[in-house]
Amino acid sequence: MTEESMDVDVSMPTNTVEEYLRMERMPHIWCPGCGIGTTVNCFVHGLEASGLDLKKVAVVSGIGCTGRVAGYLKLDSFHTTHGRAIPFATGLKLANPELKVVVYSGDGDLVAIGGNHFIHAARRNVDMTVILINNFIYGMTGGQVAPTTPVGATASTTPYGNFEEAFNLPYLAESCGAVYVARWTAYHVRHAAKAIKDALLKKGFSFVEILAPCPTLYSRRNKLGDGLDQMKFYAAASEIQNDADTKAVGLSFQGKIVVGKFVDKDKPTYLDAMNTFYVQKFGDRYAPYKG
Amino acid sequence: MKADPKGVMTGAFFIDGDHACAEGAIAAGCRFVAGYPITPSTEVVERIAERFPLIGGLFIQMEDEIASSIAIQGAAWAGKKAMTVTSGPGFSLMMEHIGLAAMTETPCVFVDVQRAGPSTGLPTLPAQGDMMQARWGSHGDYGIIAVCPNSPQESFDLTIKAFNLSEQYRVPVLVMLDECVGHMTERVVIPPADQIEITPRRSWEGPPEGFLLYKPDKDGVPPMVKAGDGYNVHVTGLTHDERGYPVMTAAVQEKLVHRLVNKIRLNAEAIVEFREDQVDGAEVMVVSYGITSRVAIPAIEQARQEGLKVGHFRLITAWPFPKRRIRELSAKVRAFVVPEINYGQMVHEVERSLGRTVPVVPVSHGGGSVHNPKDIYGAIVNSLKG
């Protein structure tokens, strides 16, 4: 820091994102170079652009590095159990359909331990936005292999390299019924913010995957440099292919990253389907469920 | 407050304990149920699924018991009275979320229609083997409440009580049915709504400024707000301070766990419920609960006909345990006999509640049927021979 920059009046807010954060909880726990904070920045900009009533927005996280996001957002926020953010969010949303419910969690949380809930919430088309931060590794517990770790990458529990095929998450989400699917990286901050805005305004199960560097555990172990090096890699390796066939967007170790908006379609949500069905069944005897 | 008449099916019915449990939940104001099919509990959610659409409730059959046991907590934070229903294997899967509800002080009700275990055990046959799991099943220390009905009528009544206690103390409350009571059909009287007392949520009505999510009232229980009301709550299963924010210190842990345990322990006298029959002058006291409290009756009556002075003490709340009353009784009787369909669970609570050394005789049963009353009779007779 230079002499000049130290003259800046630090009592003035310098970041418009701050009003959306629980600043009393800063500093956060994320490592230098971690991409999760960048995605929170994108989320706040996307949320702001959505025009949603903040009183009616609730964020639900599971456990892990990304699981800490809920605790830093100045919204109704729930930090639940490992893998179970989606069923908590399902209960929250169905009990009060006025809420916009966002699930914000990591790859291990949402598609390993929480995989069953992910596929069923997408199948039911529960109206929620799932933001999955994919850093290819279990960060909080010290760098273990994840269902997203690419073949050939090394983790603490695959010291000789990973040989299990990784999930192609956009394909998984689309196959299970998600109505909006996009993938971006922490490098694509404007695209990611726009995707989050679109996902928040989409009715139904919307899914945004954001790749994010984990310099401490993933990059270091795999000799990929620091957070900045990984961002440079994202910039160089990414190829925007909106409407790409999700079958073809699987990731390989340091290979091409297809990003973009892959799915955007309309389908009745769980509650819409329920209300339509029961109105047909019961006629006037049924009062459409509003929570 | 009184029950909402919408949904209260006032009248006299011939229904089983599972169906009565469903009606109790509806009468208590429950409008959100998440569940997963499992014998012998399924009839509860089947009745809920049939009844809810026309009374403004929502039933969702989740993908598993883990999901069910946390979906109800999301619903509770949206303002609903919520319940899940299961049996042994599913109850085991729900343990982590009983801990979450205890830690986050989320009012909700778990129904466990007990069957014989361990593991898949005897899916269609009774046991009372989950009583200690109900108390200690989730990791760490917390207070809990569990009730154990012995008839369809009590299944109705105690399910209402479970919801009321859950709201009053902001704890998960467990309704510990067993396969016999769940599938037993008897007369159940559902009173008019204006005769059903309902405990409303302890809601905080003040402004968000200065509001502390976990600042307790004098009885150790904090008032609650719900999502969507502008309080920006943060709810976490991590150890947290009164703001609800995570704090990783032994001091905050001690303060929180102390309160979670003591809000039940210090209010135990108000929560505990039991029934006594001929305890004055009794030489031997049979302590029982659930279906076994009914199977014990012929044994007790036979012993009485033969001149033995036998009292019968029936647990309505298993947790908290009526420790003080058992201690008092231990000063007067020569022995306790504790029949239960397990290899010795609540008998340990009787033993550790004694004020002096008195024989405590378990009448164990591995599950799959109820006791032969002769075995309970034999234990009563033998307990006085020592």
Image: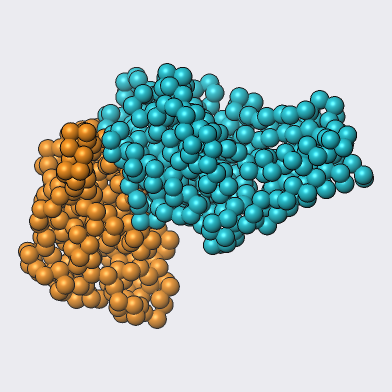
Chain colours: A orange, B cyan
Camera-nearest residue between B73 and B141: B73
Depth check: give the residue in front, B378 or B127.
Answer: B378
Left or right side of B147 for B197? left
Q: Is residue A225 above or below residue B26?
A: below
Does residue A10 appear left or right of residue B176 in this picture? left
- Residue B318 image point, x, y percent: 63, 38
Q: Position of residue B326 (x, y in %)?
A: 75, 33
Picture mark count? 0
- Residue furthest toward the right? B386
- Which residue occupies the foreground of this view, B288 or B255? B288
In the rendered image, the quadrant that contains the N terminus of chain B is: top left
Q: Residue sitting at 54 percent across and 62 percent down? A: B120
In this rendering, the answer to whether B288 lies above or below B1 is below
Q: Is residue A157 left or right of residue B307?
A: left
Residue A168 in view here: yes
Q: Quadrant of residue B279?
A: top right
Of residues B366 and B189, the one nearer the viewer is B189
Q: Residue at x 39, y 28 (%)?
A: B8
Give the residue drawn at x 54%, y 38%: B186
Looking at the image, is B121 positioned above or below residue A155? above
The residue drawn where x is 67% and y is 40% is: B294
Residue B31 shown left or right of residue A203 in the figure:
right
Q: Quadrant of the C terminus of chain B?
A: top right
Question: Where's residue B378, x and y in %?
Answer: 83, 48
Residue B196 placed where, x, y %? 46, 22
Inspect this view and state whether residue B242 appears: no
